[in-house]
Image (tube, rainbow, N blue to C red):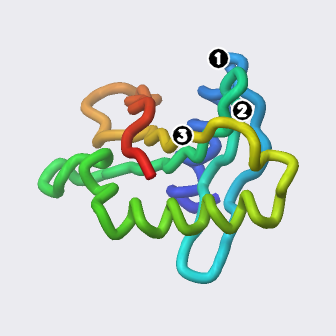
Amino acid sequence: MAQADAYEELAAQWLRARGWEIVARNVRFRGGELDIVALDGGHLVFVEVRQRSNPRYTGAAASVGRDKQRRLVRAASLFLQRHPRWANRPCRFDVIAFEPPQSAAHPEPRWIRAAFTA
């Protein structure tokens, strides 16, 4: 399993442990990809999973810049067009970030609820 896939699996497990329902994973569209689409109560949440293994670079959460946000919004729009049953739910964009591990064997995710708006 690739490192990115492993972190996405950790994020999905973390969300499920909190009662979220995973609707879809790794949904690819031309120009964008959705890591996790999940239900948090009545909200449809598009979750971007980011990780950094080297502390010299910007933090994982900070790596979701304007260009990445635009691609995520476009992918979410396409997802809703293809899956109209979800279209009437309130939506939001969350980020789950994994920073470089210090000494922990299993890094704790940093959840950023409503990380940006569309």
Residue assigned mark 3: 92
Instruction: Name the residue located 51 percent from the left edge and 61 percent from the top edge.
Output: 73
Q: Which residue type does callout 2 highlight?
A: Leu
User: Which image quarter holds the N terminus?
Assistant: bottom right
Q: Which residue type does callout 3 highlight?
A: Arg
Image position of 4 (left or right of 50): right
Name the N-terminal-most of marks 3 and 2: 2
Closer to us: mark 3 or mark 2? 3
Residue assigned mark 1: 18
Instruction: Name the residue located 61 percent from the left edge and 59 percent from the top edge.
Output: 76
Residue 58, image x, y percentages: 18, 53
Closer to us: mark 1 or mark 2? 2
Name the element at disc 3: strand
Image position of 27 (left or right of 76): right
Q: CA distance from mark 3 to mark 2?
A: 10 Å
Residue 25, image x, y percentages: 71, 53
Please give the label number shown on residue 39.
2
Tell me if label 1 and label 3 are in contact, CB under 8 Å.
no
